[in-house]
Image: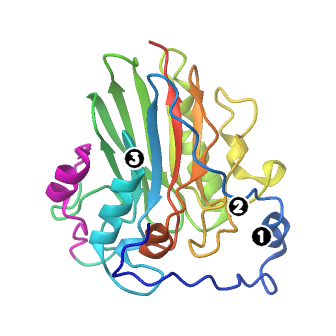
Amino acid sequence: MRRPDLPAPPRPRFPITGLPASIRAVLKPVPAIPHAAEAPHRALRVASYNVHKCIGTDGRFDPDRIREVIREIDADIIALQEVDRRFGTRDGLLNLAELEARTGLVPVPVNGIRNAHGWHGNLLLVRSGLVHNVEQIALPGLEPRGAIVTDLRFDDHGPLRVVAAHFGLLRQSRARQVARLSSYLSATQDMPALLMGDLNEWRSDHGSVLHGLHAGIDRLPPAVASFPASRPRLPLDRIIPFGRSDISPVTAHDSDLARMASDHLPIKAWLSLPA
């Protein structure tokens, strides 16, 4: 149900002409946003969300809308991107105490700039489980990018490694970033892993740099369109499992508020781990 104080979000036509051929080629094959699946028994809901520095599709800065979208998703583990200002003091943009009160999610601690929430704008929030290890990775490329590698332990679900990342805009940079993270996803024979984040890779299977992640996956799982939020056409955001785990099809969280709060829709899935 739409909040009464929010107008219906605009649904503009997404301009197909004038885009690079590599983007136009994937606009039609991207599947429509499916309905959310029922929760499997003893499964964790995992999600990824580029919050676009809390600036919505209406151009308004509103961290409260982002908080409410995160509450709607109701994830056990969620990777956020662009949670800090990009320049200057790089202040965090969310009220983490209020977010915890509304959702039960707490941030995985990172060592970064004093006022920032995350690492290169990446923040990982978890509802339960023990944080066993955290490593902050600087990713190569023209733009400053990073990733957070977190090992989690669960009483009922077993261990899990989560790699939360935001890849660059240039394909050459993304290929180098894939190579940098590959070892963190291949050393998971006894620990399932997830790569989650805005990977900025819209290409289909054969042309995707994500094939460099040849670590415990035979093929990339189907992607779901998440950008732009008002009329999703490109699958920029991904949740990719590695190792022994069972994951449901990834879906986009397509609510009225989500279409307005950021230029990306959140994506989510159910994850079942070995006991």
Q: Residue at x 79, y 77 (%)?
A: 20
Quadrant where the image shows the N terminus: bottom left
- Position of residue 148 relative to residue 122, above or below, is above
Secondary structure at badge 3 equals: strand
> Residue 78, labelled with which disc?
3
> Residue 202, labelled with which disc?
2
Secondary structure at badge 2 equals: loop
Mark sitting earlier along the chain (2/1): 1
Label 2 – label 1 distance at C-alpha: 7 Å
Q: Is residue 134 visible?
A: yes
Magenta residue check for 220: no
Q: Residue 213, position in %: x, y?
A: 65, 39
Magenta residues, start to end = 89-111
Q: Amino acid at mark 3?
A: Ile
Mark sitting earlier along the chain (2/3): 3
Q: Residue at x 40, y 19 (%)?
A: 157
Magenta residue check for 92: yes
Q: Residue 91, position in %: x, y?
A: 21, 70
> Residue 23, labelled with which disc?
1
- Along the viewing direction, whichever of 19 and 37 lies nearer the viewer: 37
Q: Quadrant of residue 5?
A: bottom left
CB under 8 Å between discs 2 and 1: yes
Secondary structure at badge 1 equals: helix
Label 2 – label 3 distance at C-alpha: 21 Å
